[in-house]
Image (tube, rainbow, N blue to C red):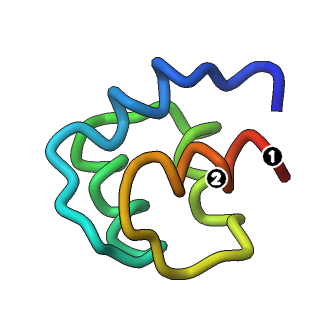
């Protein structure tokens, strides 16, 4: 996903506690006022459980 940068993702998930699930990633991104494209991307992930931010980055950028 070219238009979404790792920095956008990091800002959207600032303050996230891990491990977590997709629902909480989406909620955190919304509470951090993330762009709609970030929220949609997180909501569309195939995985549901994440042990840390590196797993989220892999899921987002290696789809």
Provide residue 12's location: percent of width, then percent of height: 36, 36
Rendered residue at 55%/24% (across/down)? 6
Rate crowding at label 2 as few (under 14), some (14 to 19) or many (20 or more) other CA atoms within 10 Å: few
**Tally of numbered tags:** 2
From this view, report whether residue 50 is shown above or below residue 29. below
Query: Position of 36 compared to 7: left or right?
Result: right
Query: Position of 53 compared to 35: left or right?
Result: left
The quarter of the picture where residue 13 lies is: top left
Q: Nearer the viewer, residue 26 or 13?
A: 13
Which residue lies under the disc numbered 2? 40
Query: Position of 63 compared to 53: left or right?
Result: right
The N terminus: image quadrant: top right
Provide residue 53's location: percent of width, then percent of height: 40, 48
The answer to whether the residue labelled 2 contacts the one labelled 1, judged by CB atoms less than 8 Å apart, is: no
Which residue lies under the disc numbered 1? 62
Provide residue 34's location: percent of width, then percent of height: 40, 34
Rendered residue at 53%/56% (across/down)? 55
Provide residue 31's location: percent of width, then percent of height: 23, 48
The quarter of the picture where residue 48 lies is: bottom right
**Which disc, if any, is residue 31?**
none
Under circle 2, the secondary element is helix
- Report, in whole angstroms, how far the alpha carbon at label 2 lies from the one at label 1: 16 Å
From this view, report whether residue 58 is shown above or below residue 24. above
Rendered residue at 25%/66% (across/down)? 18
Q: Mark 2 or mark 1, which is nearer to you?
A: 1
Between discs 2 and 1, the one toward the N terminus: 2
Under circle 1, the secondary element is loop
Rate crowding at label 1 as few (under 14), some (14 to 19) or many (20 or more) other CA atoms within 10 Å: few
From this view, report whether residue 9 is shown above or below residue 8. below
Rendered residue at 23%/37% (across/down)? 14
């Amino acid at each position: 996903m070219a238009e979404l940068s790792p920095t956008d993702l990091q800002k959207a998930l600032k303050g996230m506690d891990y491990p977590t699930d997709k629902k909480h990633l989406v909620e955190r991104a919304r509470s951090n006022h993330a762009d709609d494209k970030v929220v949609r991307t997180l909501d569309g992930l195939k995985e549901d459980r994440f042990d840390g931010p590196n797993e989220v980055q892999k899921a987002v950028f290696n789809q």
